[in-house]
Amino acid sequence: MSKLHVTTKVNGDTVEFLCDPRETLLDVLRDRLGLTGAKEGCGTGDCGACSVTVDGRLVCSCLMLGAEAEGKEIATVEGIAEGGALHPLQKKFIEYAALQCGICTPGILVAAKNLLEKTPDPTEEQVRYWLAGNLCRCTGYDKIIRAVMDTAAEMREAS
C-alpha cells in the first residue's frame, strides 16, 4: 500500500510526514514525529490517554487516522509548556500531586487546557464532565479536579 504525504501543524510548527492510510494519528505522533506524550491506553477511544486537540477540538488520537491530519492544527501535551516555562496547569498538577503513574496525565492535561480555553470559570461539575472521558486508575480524581479548579482561578486572577 502506498504511503500518503501529509502536511499539518503540530504545536504551532508545520510538519510533513508519510504514513500508511490505516495508521492512526497516535501512531504518527509517536512513531513518525517523536512526540511520545500521548499514550495508547486502550486503542478504542475509551480512556483518553491519547487526547490531543485538532483544530481546537478534543479528540482521541487513537481513533483518528494520520492522513486526516492534512491541513489541520494539532496540539499535544508537548506544546503546553510555554517557552520552557511550565503552563499553570502543569504547575498545579505538581503542586496538588495530581499524577502518579503518568499514563493518563498527558491526556488529562490536554483536555483540561482545552476546557479552560473554552470555559475560563468552570464549575466543579463542568470540570468533572469535561474530564469524564479521561480514565485514571491511580489518583481517584479529587486531586486532578482541585488542580484544574485552582488553575482556573489563578488564570482568571492573572488576566
Image (spheres, rainbow, N blue to C red):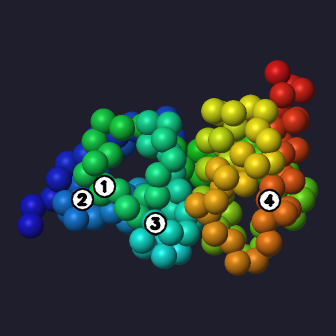
Q: CA distance from mark 2 to mark 4?
A: 35 Å
Pointer 1: what residue? Answer: 66
**Mark 2 vs 4: CB contact within 8 A:** no
Residue type of the residue flagged with mark 2? Cys
Would residue 40 appear left or right of 138 to someone viewing this image?
left
Pointer 2: what residue? Answer: 19
Residue at the extreme left of the image, as rendered? 1
**Mark 2 vs 1: CB contact within 8 A:** yes
Residue type of the residue flagged with mark 4? Ile
Q: CA distance from mark 2 to mark 3?
A: 21 Å
Residue type of the residue flagged with mark 1? Gly
Pointer 3: what residue? Answer: 45
Element type at marker 1?
A: helix
The mark nearer the N terminus, 2 or 1, is 2
Q: Position of residue 40 (x, y in %)?
A: 49, 72
Q: CA distance from mark 4 to mark 3?
A: 20 Å
